[in-house]
Image: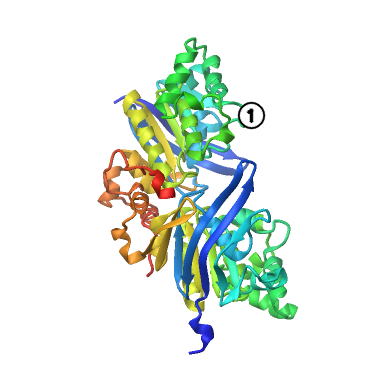
C-alpha cells in the first residue's frame, strides 16, 4: 500500500505550549482515517498542520509522495488536498454567491471548463442549479456544509481533510452529510482524514482511528477493535463510555 | 393533601408563539400542551422545531415583538400570561430557572463568578454578605468544583467550558427553584465532560426535588435522562412517550431521529435519513 499522508515526529509549538507533541501517523491511499479526542487534544491542529494552516517546527510531512515543511504549500498541494471545516456558518464568505465561491478555486487553478464543473459539483452534493446564485445566509446549515463539500471536491483532490464536518448540524442532517461524504469517497476513490469528538461518527466512517490526548497520539486502533473492545488505553475506554450516553449508577 | 400540591407544577395548554416578519407571521410554536409535575420531561426536536421557544415562553424570555397565546400557561396555578412583569421577574430565577447552552455567552464576562452568583441570590433573598458568600461557596462545592474559594474570584474566561457550565448550574440552583429548564445544557461541551455535568445535574435535581424540562436535539441523551419525552416537529408535538417505550415509537419522525445516529458496532451504509413528509407539519 502506498502512503497518502505520512507524518513523522511532528511537533507544533505555540510559545511554550506544545499543541502537537511528536506525533507520527501513516494514512494509506484510499483509506478513511479518523482522529478522535476532546477539545485541546490537538486533533484539529494536526489537520491544520497538514494543510499548512499551522506551522510545524519539527518532524516530517509527506503528502502523496511529496515532502513539505513549515506552513509553505505549493499549488500542487492544494490540487491534491482539500479541507472541509467544522462551522458552515463561518467557512463560507457571507458576501459571495455560491457561484462565486465555487468559481474561485477553479480560477486559481486555471480550469477552463468552469460552467460544466460548477453544474456537476452542485449536482453531486444534491443541491442542483437553483442554488447557484444564492448567498450563504439564504441556505440552511446542512446546505452550507454541502456547498463547502462541493467547493472541496470541485478541484478533484485525492485527499480530503474533514474537521468535524457534522458537529454543528442536527442529527438527522448529520446522517445526510455522512452519506454524501461516503458516496463521494466511493465515486472518486478519495482518502479521508477525519477529525471528530464523536466516536460513533468516526467508527461509522473510518477503518482506522487514532485517539489523541494533550497533543499526543494515545493509540491507533482498527474499527473492529472498538467493537470488540480490544484496545489498551484507558482514555479510549473513557471516550467509548462517553459515547454510549448518560447512565445513572 | 393540600390543593397546592395537587396542582401540577406547570400546566401548558395550546401554547402558541408567533413572530411577525416582513413576509407575514411565523408561528414558531403551534399549540403545545403538556403538564409537568416533579418529574423530568425531555423536549426533543431539530433546529427550528420550536423546542427552545417553548422553554423561553415558559421562562418569559420571548423577544418583545413576538406574541404568546395559550389557553393555559400556569405555574403552580398562577397564570403566567396575565402576571405583571414585576411578579414575573420575582418568579424568574427564584422559582423557575433556566440553564442555557453555552457558558461562554451566558455568563457575564466582566464580573467574577462569585459576584454573579451572589447577585442572583441577593436579588431574591435578603441575606448578609457573609451568608451570601458562604452559600455561594457551598453551592460551588455542590456542583463538584474542587477549589470553590479560587473559582469564586475567577472571571468566566479563566475557566473551562465544563467548569463554566457547572458555575451556570450553581447560579441557577442557588435560590432553590422548583422548576428548572435546561436548554441544551451540554451540547457545547466535550463528550467526556458532558457526562460529568449531566451526572451533577441529575444528582441535584433528584436531591432537591425539582421539576426539570430538558431541551435537546439528542433523542438518545434525553431518553437516558428523562422520564417522559415530547418530540417536536415544526412547532408541534408529534409524539409523547415514556422513555421506557421509546423503542415502540410510532411516529416516523421519532423513529427516524432514533435511527439516523451512527453507532459503534452497527454497520449501516448508507445511514437511514429522514424522509420528511409534508403532512407531519400540518
Where's residue B26, x and y in %?
Answer: 57, 48
Q: Looking at the picture, tell me which residue is in the foreground, B118 or A72.
A: B118
Quick check: A33 left or right of A51?
left
The answer to whether residue A129 shows anywhere in this view is yes
* Residue in front for this viewpoint, A71 or A17: A71
Q: In this orientation, does residue B99 appear?
A: no
Residue carrying label 1: A95
Residue nearest the observer in this picture, B123 or A2: B123
Q: Is residue B181 above or below residue A31?
A: below
Quarter of image, res B87: bottom right
- Residue at 61%, 51% (x, y): give it: B19
Q: Is B140 positioned to the left or the right of A170 in the image?
A: right
Could you say where residue A158 lies in the image, as x and y percent from the top left?
40, 23
Task: Specify the subunit that label 1 lies on.
Answer: A
Place of residue B78 in the rendered image (x, y in percent of width and height, measured from the top left): 60, 76
The one of B106 and A216 positioned closer to us in this rendering? B106
Give the quadrant of residue A196: top left
What x and y, as percent, mark residue B14?
Answer: 51, 63
At 58% from the left and 30% from the top, the residue drawn is: A135
Residue B258 lies, with reference to residue B166, above or below; the image says: above
- Colour scheme used in the picture? rainbow
Decide: few, some or many residues near mark 1? Use Cα within 10 Å; few <14, some 14-19, many ≥20: few
Q: Is residue B138 left or right of residue B229?
A: right
Residue B134, located in which quarter of the rendered image? bottom right
Q: Is residue A222 left or right of residue A167?
A: left
Q: Quadrant of the C terminus of chain A?
A: bottom left
Residue, x 55% and y 67% (percent of image)?
B71
Secondary structure beneath dot 1 equals loop
Amino acid at each position: 500500500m502506498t502512503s497518502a499522508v505520512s507524518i513523522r515526529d511532528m511537533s507544533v509549538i505555540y510559545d511554550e505550549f506544545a499543541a502537537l507533541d511528536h506525533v507520527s501517523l501513516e494514512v494509506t491511499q484510499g483509506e478513511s482515517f479518523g482522529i478522535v479526542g476532546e477539545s485541546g487534544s490537538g486533533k484539529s491542529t494536526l489537520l491544520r498542520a497538514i494543510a499548512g494552516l499551522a506551522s510545524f517546527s519539527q518532524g516530517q510531512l509527506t503528502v502523496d509522495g511529496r515532502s513539505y515543511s513549515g506552513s509553505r504549500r505549493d499549488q500542487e498541494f492544494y490540487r491534491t488536498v482539500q479541507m472541509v471545516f467544522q462551522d458552515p456558518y463561518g467557512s463560507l464568505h457571507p458576501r459571495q454567491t455560491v457561484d462565486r465561491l465555487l468559481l474561485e478555486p477553479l480560477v486559481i487553478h486555471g480550469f477552463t471548463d468552469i460552467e460544466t464543473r460548477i453544474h456537476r459539483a452542485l449536482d453531486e452534493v444534491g443541491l442542483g442549479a437553483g442554488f447557484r446564485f444564492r448567498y450563504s445566509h439564504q441556505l440552511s446549515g446542512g446546505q452550507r456544509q454541502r456547498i463547502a463539500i462541493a467547493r472541496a471536491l470541485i478541484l478533484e483532490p485525492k485527499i480530503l481533510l474533514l474537521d468535524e464536518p457534522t458537529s454543528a448540524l442536527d442529527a438527522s442532517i448529520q446522517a445526510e452529510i455522512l452519506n454524501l461524504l461516503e458516496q463521494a469517497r466511493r465515486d472518486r476513490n478519495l482518502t479521508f482524514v477525519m477529525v471528530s469528538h464523536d466516536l460513533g461518527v468516526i467508527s461509522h466512517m473510518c477503518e482506522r482511528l487514532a485517539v489523541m490526548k494533550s497533543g499526543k497520539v494515545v493509540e491507533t486502533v482498527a474499527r473492529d477493535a472498538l467493537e470488540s473492545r480490544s484496545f489498551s488505553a484507558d482514555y479510549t475506554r473513557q471516550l467509548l463510555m462517553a459515547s454510549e450516553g448518560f447512565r445513572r449508577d | 393533601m393540600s390543593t397546592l400540591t395537587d396542582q401540577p407544577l406547570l400546566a401548558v395548554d395550546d401554547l402558541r408563539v408567533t413572530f411577525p416578519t416582513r413576509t407575514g407571521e411565523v408561528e414558531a410554536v403551534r399549540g403545545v400542551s403538556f403538564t409537568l409535575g416533579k418529574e423530568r420531561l425531555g423536549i426533543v426536536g431539530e433546529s427550528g422545531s420550536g423546542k427552545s421557544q417553548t422553554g423561553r415562553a415558559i421562562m418569559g424570555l420571548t423577544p418583545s415583538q413576538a406574541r404568546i397565546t395559550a389557553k393555559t400557561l400556569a405555574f403552580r396555578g398562577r397564570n403566567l400570561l396575565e402576571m405583571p412583569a414585576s411578579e414575573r421577574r420575582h418568579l424568574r430565577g427564584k422559582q423557575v430557572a433556566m440553564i442555557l447552552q453555552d457558558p461562554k455567552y451566558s455568563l457575564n464576562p466582566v464580573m467574577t463568578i462569585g459576584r454573579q452568583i451572589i447577585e442572583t441570590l441577593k436579588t431574591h433573598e435578603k441575606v448578609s454578605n457573609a451568608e451570601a458568600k458562604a452559600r455561594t461557596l457551598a453551592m460551588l462545592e455542590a456542583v463538584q468544583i474542587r477549589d470553590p474559594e479560587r473559582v469564586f474570584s475567577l472571571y468566566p474566561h479563566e475557566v473551562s467550558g465544563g467548569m463554566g457550565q457547572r458555575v451556570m448550574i450553581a447560579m441557577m440552583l442557588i435560590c432553590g427553584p422548583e422548576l428548572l429548564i435546561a436548554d441544551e445544557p451540554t451540547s457545547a461541551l466535550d463528550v467526556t465532560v458532558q457526562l460529568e455535568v449531566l451526572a451533577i445535574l441529575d444528582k441535584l435535581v433528584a436531591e432537591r426535588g425539582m421539576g426539570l424540562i430538558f431541551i435537546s436535539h439528542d433523542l438518545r441523551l434525553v431518553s437516558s435522562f428523562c422520564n417522559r419525552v415530547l418530540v417536536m416537529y415544526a412547532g408541534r408535538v408529534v409524539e409523547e412517550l415514556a422513555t421506557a417505550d421509546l423503542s415502540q415509537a410510532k411516529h416516523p419522525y421519532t423513529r427516524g431521529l432514533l435511527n439516523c445516529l451512527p453507532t459503534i458496532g452497527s454497520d449501516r451504509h448508507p445511514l437511514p435519513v429522514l424522509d420528511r413528509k409534508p403532512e407531519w407539519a400540518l
